[in-house]
Amino acid sequence: MKKVLLFVCVAMIALSLFPRTVAFADTTEKSNRYTVTYYDGVASSSGYYFGQSGISVTTVVRDDGFKQGLTDADAEKMFAEIDELMATLDALSDTQTVGSDIYNFNHSATGETIVIHKYTYEMLNIAHKMYTVTNGAFNPAVYRLVDLWGFSSRTYHADGNLPYDRKWQDQDGNGTKESYPLPDQKYIDAFRRLTDFDGVEVFEKDGQYFVKKTCPDVTVDGVNYSQWIDLGGIAKGYAADLADDIIVKYGYDKGYVNVGTSSFTFLQYSDEKGWALDLQDPFNGWSSYASLEISDAVLSTSGQYVRKYTTDGVEYSHIIDASTGRPAQTGIVTVTTIGGSAAEDDCLTTALTVMGLDKAVEFINGDYFAENKLDVSLVYDGGMSVKHMITNIETSRFVTYGTNQIQLSSKFTDDGKVYVSFSNIKHLGDKDAVIGIIVSVAVIFVIVAVTVSVRKGRTLTTAQRVASVAKSKTFKFADIIVYGALTVLIAVLFIVFVIGDSTKGELERFYITDDATGKIIYSFDFENYGTSDYLGDINSYWENGSVTVNRIADEVYVIVRRNDIEGDHYNIVKAEKTDTGFKVTVIEATCSNYADCVHSFFPITTSNRSIVCIPHRITVVGYNSNDRDDVIII
């Protein structure tokens, strides 16, 4: 099924002079932190929060999804309230903002008690619950180790002023920092002693909320280090939960909240169907490994394929295992949980990654998942060419599942428990398995035929063989039937699985959107690719930056520059023709140390695929005229 990234325009409706029932007109206006759009039956607010990370937050409601009597002013109040919530959570939880609750805790002395906001108190209590439930697999107190391994906001933005900081390395000479030297073992051993989250004491007294640091300090080479924590593994889900409460309070029953494309709360899509979701393939960023519909539920997803670097040929990602003091390398590369609360789901996706396959399956079959009626889908890489999809979701609930590389490898026992079966060939969609079986059968058939012929030949003299061959026909009628049927079968399979699959979602156009405003700032129609002077269409009314296009022979280079971010910030997008169609890639960017848009996304070669640059707030999207426009890729 062809899919396309859900496109949500952003802008603000003008205040009405008289209250009236909301009818979403096509209007746009921008506030200081966020933008609101009323467009084609959808109302949306979109902004960026949570410090230097620049996490996108999008709230969407449908105009048929509210109780009668709602006014334009009500809608504006709702979006403003959600914005204020996000800004408050940002100010409380950011590790680098001086004066935030988390900054104050991290810079407090051991034994010191500090006053915190109710939101921080609630997040810490949820974190303590999930720390206990997961036996420490979810642990906000690994933040010293996160910083040590180069995955904190501080090291991400190159603020290297601590003794254990190292210099980022540019391995391919393109000006980005893809590799980080490994830390000394003495720091790993020391900082592991700072991961006791039970040492973070949270309590309420006289209507105020407090947190106390009790974990003993450690000393390395004469330098003292105290415990640091980070709520990044729970704050997005907590924000989604509270924003969902606000939407319901204002009377809406159709819509969703998306925090950072990893934490979602969903109301209804319509009375007939749910929201269509694609679960992103961690090995092919432009593809999905499963599709399903969801309604009136929450969802969280995390992956080892986004925040990562490679040093000495080994890949390291941002999820840290407190028991080893190192990035988790359990083979679990992505986890999606559905149900419960978004805050707790955030904790679970991290914890299941840290647990590893055996413990994760045991936990999925345990009381917590059963009591909270949770669904999960994860992808496991055991180092072989075939990767494995493990899920407790019945296959009948998926629209599609599995790819050529990822096969369904979980089954159910009679009592509904999940178990792993790596020998389980999932279905005919696995082209490698099907073609392998066909080829094997054909080879066996030929071997048997030759063997029978040879055995018959052994009973004949040479003269008899010559006479027999001279008299016999080249092919008997039965031979023609068998070989003809085999040829037709192979041809049909080739057309269905090779040719048919390669033409599905053919790339007709690509466009670039400004995620801060929702505007399409550039589009290129491949139908005009053969016209040498065709450069695509630039939105000259885009106020946040500029777009320039250069064409060198058959290659098109689109340079997107932002002027609403301090410094020279740009992305270079390249479009070119290949032997099989067209290809779009981001070849250069000044967005961050990692430049994920360059290194973590696969080229766009079919429709419904995208490349996202979160720091620069742009998205490159492949398009086909047959694509659906209501699919969310997570």
Image (cartoon, rainbow, N blue to C red):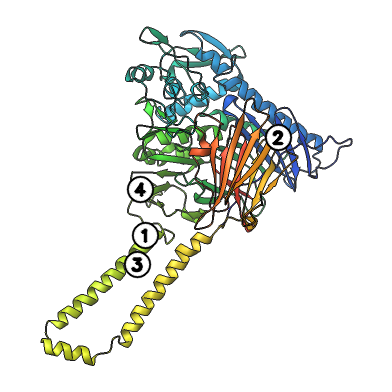
Name the residue that disc number 4 marks.
420
**Dot 1 and dot 4 residues touching (CB under 8 Å):** no
Q: Nearer the viewer, mark 4 or mark 3?
A: 3
Residue 253 visible (yes or no): no
Amino acid, disc 1? Ala
Closest to the observer, 462 or 551? 551
Q: Is residue 451 above or below residue 281?
A: below
- For label 2, the residue is 249
Give how far apart the Cα atoms at labels 4 and 2 are: 43 Å
Give, as a three-letter code, the residue at label 4: Val
Q: Give the structural element (helix, strand or loop) at label 4.
A: strand
Q: Nearer the viewer, mark 3 or mark 2?
A: 3
**Nearer-the-camera pick, 295 or 141:** 141
Q: Residues within 10 Å of mark 2 (few under 14, many from 20)?
A: few
Tell me the CA gap for discs 1 and 4.
19 Å
Find residue 283 and report its horizontal and vertical position in percent: 44, 45
Q: How far from the left and from the top, in percent, is residue 215? A: 42, 13
Q: Residue at x 38, y 78 (%)?
A: 485
10 Å neighbourhood of mark 3: few (<14), some, or many (≥20)? some
